[in-house]
Amino acid sequence: MEYASSAETTEQRAKRYQRARLRLSLCDLGLSVAFVLALLFAGWSVALRDFAWQRADNDWMAVLIYALLLGACSKLLSFPLDFYSSYTLEHRYGLSNRKPSDWWKDFAKSLLIGAAFGLGAIEILYYTLRRFPDNWWLLCWAFFALFSILMANLAPVLLFPLFYKFRPLTDEALKNRLVELSRRAGARVKGVMEWKLSAKSKKANAALIGLGNTRRIILADNLLNQYSPEEIEAILAHELAHHVHNHIWKGIGFQLALSLAAFAFADQALQHWGTYFGYRNIADFANFPLLLMVSMVLSLMALPIANAFSRRNERQADEFALRMISDISPFISSMKKLANQNLADRQPHPLIEFLFHSHPSIEKRIRRAEQFHRAA
């Protein structure tokens, strides 16, 4: 664990932690870009394709071998940064309770789930390219849209329990209070669950997850143990606002619009640049790095827009929460406590906030709450 010097404030320590996370994210991005460029321009992808075809007698098996090799290379390349950012750094700043064995178990689960979804997606992608070369991008986008909506509904009951333990909240008074808040907000919930986050982290969080029949409130045990009922109510009021204002569906819509543009640009890239890189035809799976590059470029271009959209939603959720609670003091105190506990940078550089932050800074949120109170 990394201890702060006697002269270092929590805010200064949080800034160091967040700078370290940003540097790691940028290094990971640079590594990913370099890997994709090497696959494209050094001929690695074509070599992997030829190797796969030497050991396969049909399209499905060739794609499978190629995808497994490509995924293994990518994971080996990114593993040191993944381990450092998710285990070493968190322990260094005293934010993690994970034992090494716990980290490896979660890593294995993530790897298997990612491989299952990734391999399935690549097989569907290249089957569609083989069968429908003119309209593949639209069909793949439709599949992606359906899958995104399905996972938004099912992930809370299928995937989250693989990594965390949940149990019904035993504090009946708090449960009734939060259910009543949900009723007043117009967001029906199927249950209130205690989220055993302390087994892995010292951070605190709360969320309203799922859609329709899978919508439920989850409260980290760290939150339950260290925050007052009024503070928890203020935090949940913010989360309820995302459902009341349909932010989840708006976010899915934004993601689907971006993915439609990505698929359309990918189709053009395959048609115009495929021969330059030595691909046999549009369904040649050696062109997968070209698809990745298009996706990465568009994602980076859209990142400031996506974050601005998210910050707008967060401001709207804060305003809703402040109208739902009788006193703004618990909202402000919970913001300060969460910032300290999670080592959030309360006042990042404006450019960093504009480019990389999906939430307004803590200081801005507190100032807006104070302005809301004065205007009320």
Image: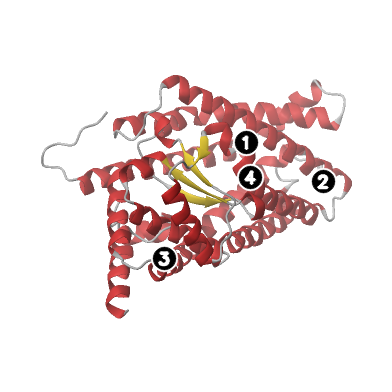
Is there a contact, CB below 8 Å, between mark 1 and mark 2? no
Return the disc, 1 or 2, that comes first in the chain's sequence.
1
- Where is residue 122 shown, x and y percent of the image? 73, 39
Q: Which residue lies under the disc numbered 1?
A: 39
Badge 2: residue crowd in 10 Å (few <14, some 14–19, many ≥20): many
- Judged left or right of residue 317, residue 12 is left
Q: Which quadrant: the C terminus?
A: bottom left
Q: How crowded is mark 4: few (under 14 residues within 10 Å), some or many (20 or more)?
A: some
Residue found at x 74% / y 26%: 65
Instruction: Residue at 30%, 51% (x, y): give it.
Output: 345
Residue identifier under label 4:
292
Q: What residue type is labelled 3?
A: Ala
Q: In which quarter of the image is residue 87?
A: top left
Return the disc, 3 or 1, that comes first in the chain's sequence: 1
Measure how far apart labels 1 and 2 are at the Cα level.
Answer: 20 Å
Which residue sits furthest left? 7
Q: How far apart are marks 3 and 1 (CA)?
A: 48 Å
Question: Disc 1 on helix, strand or loop?
Answer: helix
Query: According to the image, label 2 marks what residue?
Result: 129
Q: Horizontally, is 145 left or right of 71 in the view?
A: right
Q: Quadrant of residue 260?
A: bottom right
Check disc 2 and give the amino acid type. Leu
Of marks 1 and 4, the one in the foreground? 4
Residue at the spot of label 3: 321
Sequence-wise, the earlier of marks 2 and 4 is 2
Q: How crowded is mark 1: few (under 14 residues within 10 Å), some or many (20 or more)?
A: many
Q: Earlier in the sequence, mark 4 or mark 3?
A: 4
Q: Which of marks 4 and 3 is in front?
A: 3
Q: Residue at x 21, y 45 (%)?
A: 10
Residue 237 visible:
yes
Label 2 element class: helix
